[in-house]
């Protein structure tokens, strides 16, 4: 029962993160072209602030639940007299997941801070530059996340 709950938390947090990136990248951002650039920057600043807060929680839940699942399965294997060797797909998930969290950390704590400072100063051109960098790194994380999901499903 506990393992099922951990898996549910893990998958729902992944859905929130990957789905949110896909929505922002492919639907929200292109739709904002109806607004003037200063309005676009301000709206994306507000949206990303909320989304990144949710992703902080999602990333923490993904990491904690993933490590807990690995530890639980390893403990069960050892307690039953066997040994534990982490499966390749779990190893790939762990490495790519940690990389994605590191990239998100750069997006949230470096690039979003630049955007926040630009919006607070009313410097919308600098805000646009920060948004462009955020978009590029979100694209990288989205590609990694989709590739990871596809790889796990096909493995």
Image (spheres, grey):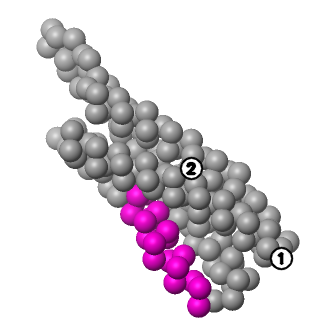
Mark 1 to mark 2 CA distance (whole Å): 25 Å
Which residue occupies the foreground of this view, 139 or 48? 139
Q: Earlier in the sequence, mark 1 or mark 2?
A: 2
The residue that mark 2 highlights is 104
Residue 86 point in image, percent of width and height: 28, 23
Q: How far from the left and from the top, in percent, is residue 104?
A: 56, 49
31 falls in the magenta region: yes
**Does 17 appear in magenta?**
yes
Q: Quadrant of residue 33?
A: bottom right
Please name the residue shown 20% across and 21% down the image: 76
Q: Could you classify mark 2 by the number of other residues whose Cα lies within 10 Å: few (under 14), some (14-19), or many (20 or more)?
A: many
Principal SS element in the magenta part? Answer: helix
Q: Is residue 65 above or below residue 120?
A: above
Q: Quadrant of the C terminus?
A: top left
The residue furthest top is: 81
Residue 140 seen in the figure: yes
Secondary structure beneath label 2: helix
Which quarter of the rendering shows the N terminus? Answer: top left
Using the image, determine if residue 118 lies above or below residue 138: below
Left or right for 90, reference 115: left
Q: Residue at x 78, y 76 (%)?
A: 124
For the residue carrying disc 1, how many other residues have a C-alpha within 10 Å: few (<14), some (14-19), or many (20+)?
A: few
Q: Is residue 101 left or right of residue 133?
A: left
Answer left or right for 46 relative to 5: right
Q: Relative to 60, does residue 30 appear above or below in the rendering?
A: below
Check the image and report above or below for 48 versus 105: below
The residue to which callout 1 is attached is: 122
At x 80%, y 64%, the residue is 117
Range of magenta residues: 16-34
Q: Nearer the viewer, residue 97 or 1?
A: 97
């Amino acid at each position: 029962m506990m393992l099922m709950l951990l898996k549910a938390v893990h998958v729902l947090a992944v859905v929130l993160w990957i789905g949110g990136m896909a929505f922002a990248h492919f639907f929200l951002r292109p739709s904002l072209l109806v607004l003037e650039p200063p309005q676009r920057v301000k709206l994306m600043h507000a949206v990303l602030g909320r989304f990144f807060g949710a992703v902080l929680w999602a990333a923490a839940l993904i990491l904690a639940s993933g490590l807990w699942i690995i530890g639980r399965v390893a403990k069960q294997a050892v307690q039953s007299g066997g040994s534990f060797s982490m499966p390749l797909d779990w190893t790939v998930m762990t490495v790519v997941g940690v990389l994605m969290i590191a990239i998100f950390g750069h997006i949230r704590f470096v690039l979003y801070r630049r955007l926040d400072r630009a919006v607070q100063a009313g410097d919308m051109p600098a805000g646009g530059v920060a948004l462009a960098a955020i978009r590029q790194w979100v694209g990288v994380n989205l590609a990694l996340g989709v590739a990871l999901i596809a790889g796990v499903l096909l493995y």
